[in-house]
Image (cartoon, rainbow, N blue to C red):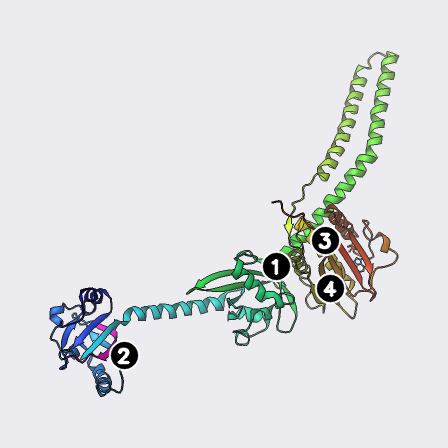
Amino acid sequence: MKEPGDEPLRALLDETAIGIKWITPDGRVAEVNRGLCRLLGYSREELLGRRYDEITHPDDLEQDAALFAQLLDGRIRSYAIDKRYFSKTGELLYVRVTSALARTPEVLRLAIVEDMRARRDAESIRREGEVRFQSILQAVPDGMVIIDEAGLIQSFSPSAERLFGYVASEVIGKNVSILMPSPHRELHDSYIERYLATGERRIIGIGRVVSGARKDGSVFPMELSVGEARIEGRRIFTGFIRNLTERQEAERRLDHLQRELMHVARLSEMGQMGSTLAHELNQPLTAITNYLNAGRRLLESQGVAGTERIIETMDKAGAQAQRAGEIIRHLRRFVEKREADRREEDVNKVVEEASALALVGVKGSGIVVRTRFGRDLPAVLIDKVQIQQVIVNLVRNAVDAMARSPEKVLTIATSDAGGVVSVRVADTGPGLDPTIADKLFKPFVTTKEEGMGIGLSICRQIVEAHGGRIMAETSERGGAVFAFTLPAAPPAAG
Ligand code: ADP
């Protein structure tokens, strides 16, 4: 090799996987680096002096010659072509050769040779990955929506098409917020921004019940879980969406919620019953004990023979009466002591999830749901399941009340009322029946044929146990408005 540069450069050129060759004016190999030797399987000595076209596939020579002519003319400064070489063992090699003129007396042409096999492999892996991804996309039973960091939809699965009523081509490239009702529609960009800025996860990897908006504007409850991935330094978010209206899952959850509600109902009934029984039965039980004692003394004082066994029996009866009293007192304490599982919660999330669940199966009834969530509400310290039972109850009552109304608008709102958070559920039904308006929250008050009249009394118990208040009124426009408050959680210590 004549003059490829100084030693370090030479070392570098030998080290790289890219092949390099220097060609003499008569088309022979003047020098090669080790990369090219490795690629072709020849030693340097075997390549030196060889005509470069000997190792080129005959079909690829013509194109190369034409471009080389242009290079010589000065019409182009360099060119790259994909062609095939033969290795020493006769194997066909796919390479890309980039050539430029060197114009020294010994070297006319300089070329670098890239092995395209690795690239082809990468390409076919990529294509295979794409095919696999498409087949997953086709098959996932849940809706799958992929968005980028800007919230723009990158991919939209066929089941997402069915869920939302859009075809993929309509939504790809659009902001994902079109799939959400207000207020998320307006706020979603800020959610992503906040997440990218703070890394604080509110939905990613957690999963929540939220509402989705279809193309026709209707809203449905859905379970959303979001995953995150990084591709070449950029993030993508994958949302899996399960429609709760159409799924047994939904029924299961609703069923569960209702069973829990009944459980609380029964517990509080038991609580009330326990207190009442303890109170009502204590007196007769005490009387029984007293009479037994008196009878015992009478028997003793009369000194009738053979009364020991009667006295013994009466003692046993007395002990049993005492035990009955204990059982009742125990029951009362047990019910009163039931520990609630209270945590700091975001009211809006709790309300959103509960109302989404309460509206399961209500689809098609023509009810329009409006949510007005207060912003930056203080957290509340609550037993989420219990408070959700209150909301489910109020929403279900509102839906029942509007069954025959021409206008069916359900408004669910939250607000900050200074130290307390307030939740309002308003409907456009007939309003409160005046005959029961002042005892709505008492147990067993109902105007429904199949009603138990226990829902609102439990709501009141739950809300009051949380230190809040619940009230109801008929609005100016005629519908009922139920509102309850929850005290804001004390600020975290430290
Ligand atoms: P139930 O639903 O079994 O009757 P509740 O305690 O939940 O028990 O409700 C008691 C009563 O309160 C109902 O029967 C109904 O008369 C009245 N009520 C509740 N919610 C509404 C509402 N949104 N509009 C009108 N009346 C209502």
The N terminus lies in quadrant: bottom left
Judge from the rendering whether residue 304 lies leftward or rightward of residue 186; answer left or right: right
The span from disc 4 to disc 3 (Cα, nearest Å) is 16 Å
Residue 90 location in percent, x, y?
17, 72
Would you say residue 429 is visible in this rendering?
yes
Residue named by callout 4: 411
Q: Residue at x 15, y 69 (%)?
A: 42
Tell me the residue that label 1 is attached to.
209
Mark 2 belongs to which amino acid? Ala
In the rendered image, the vertical position of residue 376 relative to residue 124, given as above or below: above
Please report whichever mark, 2 or 1, sits nearer to the chain's N-terminal start: 2
Q: Where residue 101 appears, x then y in whole percent?
A: 21, 80
- The Cα atoms of the two marked residues, 1 and 3, are separated by 17 Å
Ligand 1 placement by image quarter: bottom right
- Amino acid type indicated by mark 4: Thr
Query: Which of the two labelled residues, at mark 2 and mark 3, occupies the earlier sequence position?
Result: 2
Q: Which residues are magenta?
A: 92-104
Foreground tag (2 vs 1): 2
Secondary element at image label 1 = strand
Q: Earlier in the sequence, mark 4 or mark 1?
A: 1
Nearest the viewer among 378 and 242 is 378
- Towards the viewer: 169 or 68: 68
Q: Which residue is mark 2?
A: 80
